[in-house]
Image: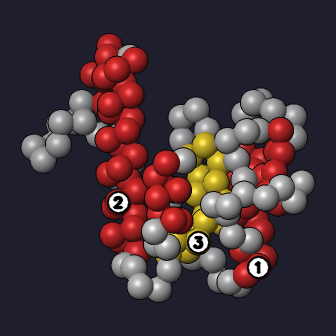
Amino acid sequence: MESLRFLVEEKRIWLYGYVIMPNHLHILWRKQDEWIDKSVQQHFLKFTAQKIKFNLIEHFPHQLEKYRSTQADRTYHFWERRPYKATMFNRNVCEQKLDYMHLNPVKAGLCTLPEDYLYSSARFYHLDLENPLLTHYMEHL
C-alpha cells in the first residue's frame, strides 16, 4: 500500500481498485497525463520489490533464497516477467475487471463477501466507504 500511496499522493496515478492476495495482487490504475506509463510501473515494481526483500531479510531470511535470480543484473527476482496489462476502454470493461478482482479473495476462500476482505478496494465500491487513495473509475470513463 505504501507504493500505491506514493503514486497517488505524487499525482502519478488515479487508483481505481486493488486486491492484495497472499501470493499476488491486482491493481487497476490510470496514469496521470504528465507521467510515462512505463516509469510509473517501474517505480511501483522496484519500490515494492525492495520492501519485500527487506521484509524477508528481517523476518524470514530463510525464504529469501527462493527469490534468487539467475540474471546478471539482479540478485533477487520478485515479479513475473510480463505482468498482465489491459486497457480500460469503457465503464463495462472496468466494472468487469473490478468484479473479477474483488471476487478473487472469495474464490480463494479468504472471505465470504468481497467487502469482508481487508486488503481490497471492494468496501469503497460495495459499502461506499471513503478511501482517500481511491478515485471512482466513473470520474474518468
Label 1 residue SS: helix
The answer to whether 63 appears left or right of 124 in the picture is: left
- Disc 3 marks which residue? 14
The answer for how far apart the CA atoms under marks 1 and 3 are is: 12 Å
Q: Which residue appears at 81% of the width and 33% of the height?
A: 111
The answer to whether 56 appears left or right of 5 in the picture is: left
Q: Which residue appears at 70% of the width and 47% of the height?
A: 120
The C terminus appears in which quarter of the rendering?
Answer: bottom right
Determine the image quadrant of residue 89. bottom right
Determine the image quadrant of residue 60. top left
Disc with the residue nearer the chain's start (2 vs 3): 3
Q: Which residue appears at 61% of the width and 38% of the height?
A: 21
Q: Check disc 3: other Cα within 10 Å, few if <14, some if 14-19, many if 20+.
A: many
Q: Is residue 81 visible?
A: yes
- Disc 1 marks which residue? 138
Q: List x then y, in percent, for residue 109.
A: 77, 30
Callout 1, which amino acid? Met
Q: Does 81 sit above or below residue 20?
A: below
